[in-house]
Image (spheres, rainbow, N blue to C red):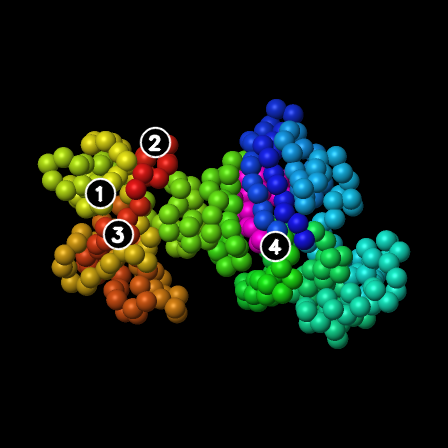
């Protein structure tokens, strides 16, 4: 396996700029997930690492070797695509061994490699089947097996689970994570699904509009998002965000929201008195009390039971407030409740530029 170093990478198609100077180091054996909305440049970056897209400027090194001008076949990487890309006329064994046969690998080594990969992926009984006789999950396992037998320096995954149904995606996520733990392989995984990013990654690279917004562990991005984009993208249900004014004179630090509502905030906020800010709080951190009580009065508009918990949608101070509770039957549509925002769960962002300030 090998480290991957990406330095000042830019990509443009004529006058359209897709990547704007990406710098990233992926350690040997690390599992890094590139996450962001469609069109943010994550798949383009992956394809540049693979050699499937030309580099407009910057440098990529795999295992310390500059690969800008190397063909894909000479980069010693393996890619797993969203579309599986299996040969329909070949059996599972033939699909998995194809790249090794092209390299004139000895038959006994091919057999050993296929048997090992097949055992890891539960494909032993399927080796003589063709792709049309396989389920979507089995086809994706074959695509991963084809990559594993090559023993490459790095694995690249381009939204490999997006064609699967929700239950199968959950199962395959677990299999991919176990496979990475077994192989210890350097892996880069592209997805727009923040649940996949949170559950799979050693580190997440959040991207938007061709720019890296934040790099860190899943909990780093969840607990301390660097800006409004990361705060809004990571987490489901999404973080509540309210425009307000920061005040630190004439009393304790607070954010004044609409309709005269003031929310206490912590000390050490990097903002001047009167600055326009955005206050954020995750739904699971909103405290809901039935029948009034301390907090802000709110009216329940919608209740969404999920089985695991309940998502409450409420109206308060002219805004929509989402809360998530593990308590069933906490409130029903039309109820009046109180909502409170604990000081230690509040996130503050500069309203104009979106950067975190507290």
Q: Which residue is mark 3?
A: 344
Q: Quadrant of the C terminus?
A: top left
Mark 1 vs 2, N-terminal side = 1
The residue at the far front in this view is 64
The reply to whether dot 3 and dot 1 touch (C-beta < 8 Å) is: no
Q: Between tags 4 and 2, which lies in front?
A: 4
**Which x, y percent locates residue 343?**
23, 50
Q: Is residue 246 above or below residue 177?
A: above
The residue positioned 56% from the left and 37% from the top of the image is 23
The residue positioned 81% from the left and 61% from the top of the image is 97
Inter-mark Cα distance, 4 to 2 = 39 Å
The reply to whether dot 4 and dot 2 touch (C-beta < 8 Å) is: no
The residue at the far left in this view is 250
Mark 2 vs 3, N-terminal side = 3
Answer left or right for 222 relative to 273.
right
Residue 272 within the segment the image draws in magenta: no
Q: Looking at the rendered structure, which numbered label has been put on residue 352?
A: 2
Residue 34, visible in the rendered structure? yes
Q: Residues within 10 Å of mark 1 (few under 14, many from 20)?
A: few
Inter-mark Cα distance, 1 to 2 = 21 Å
Q: Which residue is mark 1?
A: 267
Q: Looking at the rendered structure, which numbered label has been put on residue 29?
A: 4
The residue positioned 74% from the left and 73% from the top of the image is 124
Location of residue 58 by image quarter: top right
Q: Between tags 1 and 2, which lies in front?
A: 1
**Which x, y percent locates residue 194?**
49, 52
Magenta-tinted stretch: 30-46
């Amino acid at each position: 396996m090998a480290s991957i170093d990406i330095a000042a990478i830019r990509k443009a198609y004529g006058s359209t700029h897709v990547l704007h100077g990406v710098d990233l180091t992926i350690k040997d054996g690390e599992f890094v997930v590139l996450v962001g909305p469609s069109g943010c440049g994550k798949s383009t970056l992956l394809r540049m690492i693979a050699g499937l897209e030309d580099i407009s400027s910057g440098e990529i090194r795999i295992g310390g070797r500059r690969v800008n001008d190397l063909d894909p076949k000479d980069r010693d990487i393996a890619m797993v695509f969203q579309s599986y890309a299996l040969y329909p006329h070949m059996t599972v064994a033939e699909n998995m061994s194809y790249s090794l046969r092209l390299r004139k690998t000895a038959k006994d080594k091919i057999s050993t490699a296929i048997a090992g990969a097949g055992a890891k992926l539960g494909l032993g009984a399927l080796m003589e089947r063709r792709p049309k006789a396989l389920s979507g999950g089995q086809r994706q396992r074959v695509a991963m097996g084809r990559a594993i037998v090559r023993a490459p320096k790095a694995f690249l995954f381009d939204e490999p689970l997006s064609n699967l149904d929700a239950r199968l995606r959950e199962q395959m996520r677990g299999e991919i994570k176990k496979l990475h733990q077994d192989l210890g392989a350097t892996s880069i995984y592209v997805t727009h699904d923040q649940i996949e990013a949170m559950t799979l990654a050693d580190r997440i690279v959040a991207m938007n509009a061709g720019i890296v917004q934040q790099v860190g562990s899943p909990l780093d991005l969840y607990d301390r998002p660097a800006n409004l984009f990361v705060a809004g993208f990571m987490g489901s249900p999404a973080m509540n965000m309210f425009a307000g004014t920061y005040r630190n004179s004439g009393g304790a630090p607070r954010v004044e929201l609409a309709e005269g509502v003031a929310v206490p905030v912590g000390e050490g906020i990097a903002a001047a008195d009167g600055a326009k800010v955005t206050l954020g709080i995750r739904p699971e951190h909103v405290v809901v009390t039935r029948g009034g009580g301390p907090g802000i009065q709110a009216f329940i508009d919608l209740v969404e039971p999920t089985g695991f918990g309940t998502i409450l949608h409420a109206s308060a101070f002219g805004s929509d407030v989402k809360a998530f509770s593990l308590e069933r039957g906490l409130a029903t549509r039309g109820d009046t409740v109180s909502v409170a925002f604990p000081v230690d769960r509040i996130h503050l962002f500069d309203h104009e530029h979106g950067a975190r300030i507290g």
